[in-house]
Image (cartoon, rainbow, N blue to C red):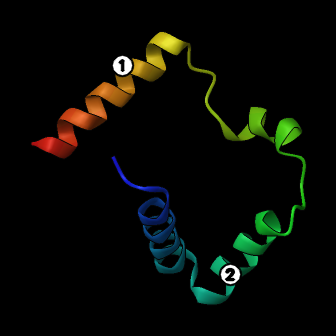
Amino acid sequence: MLTPAELRRRALEILVREMGYADAMRFMHLYELGQGDYSRERDTMLPSWSAEELLRRADDQGRRNSA
């Protein structure tokens, strides 16, 4: 499992690779500055998995990463 710092670093690397540095930074600032309403937006951002589905997918991902 990644530490919070490692997770943040990897996520930033992906954002920069996919969006470019300027847009990745703009995206990060949307959330770091406290803008937006996560409670309202999470329903559109997160899949509607059951707890069982979430655990199954996490377990599958763990197996793929350790192989």
Q: Residue at x 46, y 71 (%)?
A: 9
The amino acid type, in three-letter code, at marker 1 is Arg
Pointer 1: what residue? 56
31 versus 15 height, above or below: above
17 versus 36 height, above or below: below
Label of residue 45 in the image: none
Left or right for 38, reference 28? right
The image position of residue 21, as x and y in percent, is 59, 87
Between residue 2 and residue 40, name the one nearer to us. Answer: 2
Quarter of the rendering containing residue 42: top right
Q: Residue at x 82, y 44 (%)?
A: 38
The image position of residue 13, as x and y in percent, is 45, 75
Q: Residue at x 41, y 55 (%)?
A: 3
Which comes sooner in the sequence, label 1 or label 2? 2
Between residue 49 and residue 2, name the one nearer to us. Answer: 2
The amino acid type, in three-letter code, at marker 2 is Met
The image position of residue 65, as x and y in percent, is 21, 45
Q: Residue at x 57, y 85 (%)?
A: 20
Label of residue 25 in the image: 2
Q: From this viewpoint, which residue is outermost toward the bottom? A: 22
For label 2, the SS is helix
53 versus 31 height, above or below: above
For label 1, the SS is helix
Q: Are marks 1 and 2 in contact (CB under 8 Å)?
A: no
Left or right for 10, reference 62? right
